[in-house]
Image: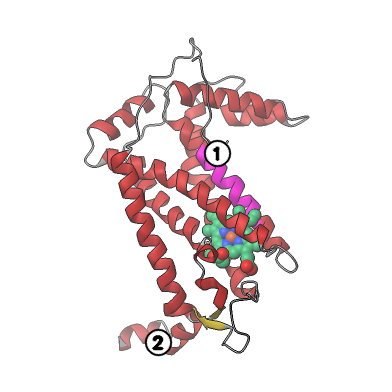
Amino acid sequence: MAWLRERIPLDGDQLREMSNEPVPNHLKRWWFALGGTPAYLFIVQIVTGILLAFYYEPSPRTAYGSVKYITDTAAYGWYFRSVHKWGATLMIAAVILHQMRVFFTGAYRKPREINWLIGMCLLACTLGAGFTGYSLVYEQLSYWGTTVGANISASVPVVGPFMKAMMLGGDTYNERTLPRLFMVHAAILPAVMLGLITVHIALIRLQGVTEFQFKDEPADKPKTFPFFPDHFYTELSVGLVLMVLLSALATILPATLGPHADPLSTPEVIKPEWFF
Ligand code: HEM
């Protein structure tokens, strides 16, 4: 320890002070812990995504087969794929619930406007990750969902056709489309989100969370409690409940695989994921 302390001059008291910022009492209500939920799910998505990327092959010839291999053959592949899929669903729901909490408590107001805008970018990135992830499987709905999504973005005035060409790597879906969707899904969006989450949380630390006075809280009681361990334990409990929920959903309703993409036959119903 002495060797380490000489090289990293940080002692227990300093660490305790840094992690122990007092937080307002209302953070004991679970819906005020909803910001930690997408952060937790983001980590789950990174870990399961890395495991899936060991096997996934992003080309029209190999993508479907590699997802089939993950689902049917690779050890625990079905489980990690299902956790990744359900993790995406829960993350989008958690981001929307957190945003609703911020909106309905008016916590976006001065001086937190910039953090609200950073949050909007996080929402866009989360939805973007959902869209590109759905496209990677190369089943009928992935192929046609991407085609419809690209055509919708082409209808945006002025920049639309450029956006479509950037998305598909050409005028129509071709062999360059999947590698670029994979890069956006597995490298660009996670890196951008990591940066945005870091700034989001740094701003929360600098400004503190918004203080509220609730009618059922006596005015003479202390208005704050320590972040560590009290609030940390709330976040930990939420994380553990989520882990059980994710595992249960992945086991009871595992991710399935539809028919292979066929560019020559349009399915009768092309439906996007629920969040679109
Ligand atoms: C990956 C997505 C996100 C993560 C990980 C995240 C994380 C957090 C965390 C940990 C907090 C502390 C308070 C709490 O837990 O409620 C917070 C507060 C806040 N978030 Fe987010 N957030 C995300 C998305 C968003 C979105 C989509 C918006 C709105 C567009 C937003 C706007 C805000 C604002 C304004 C605050 C300050 C609230 C206050 O002072 O009471 N965030 N966020």
Residue of label 2:
12
Residue 275: which disc?
1
Q: Report the side of 126 relative to 88 (left or right).
A: right
Q: Position of residue 37 (x, y in %)?
A: 47, 58
The residue positioned farthest toward the front in the image shown = 216
What crowding class fits label 2: few (fewer than 14 Cα within 10 Å), some (14-19), or many (20 or more)? few
Considering the whole magenta stretch, tell me its main secondary structure.
helix
Task: Identify residue type, mark 1.
Answer: Phe
Asked if residue 141 is among those painted magenta in the image, a careful observer would answer no
Instruction: Tell me how far mark 1 sits from mark 2, CA to CA.
Output: 44 Å
Taking 35 as reference, is 163 above or below it? above
Residue at image x 65%, y 26%? Answer: 152
Taking 121 as reference, is 270 above or below it? above
Q: Which residues are magenta?
A: 118-130
Residue at image x 68%, y 26%? Answer: 154
What crowding class fits label 1: few (fewer than 14 Cα within 10 Å), some (14-19), or many (20 or more)? few
Ligand 1 falls in which quarter?
A: bottom right
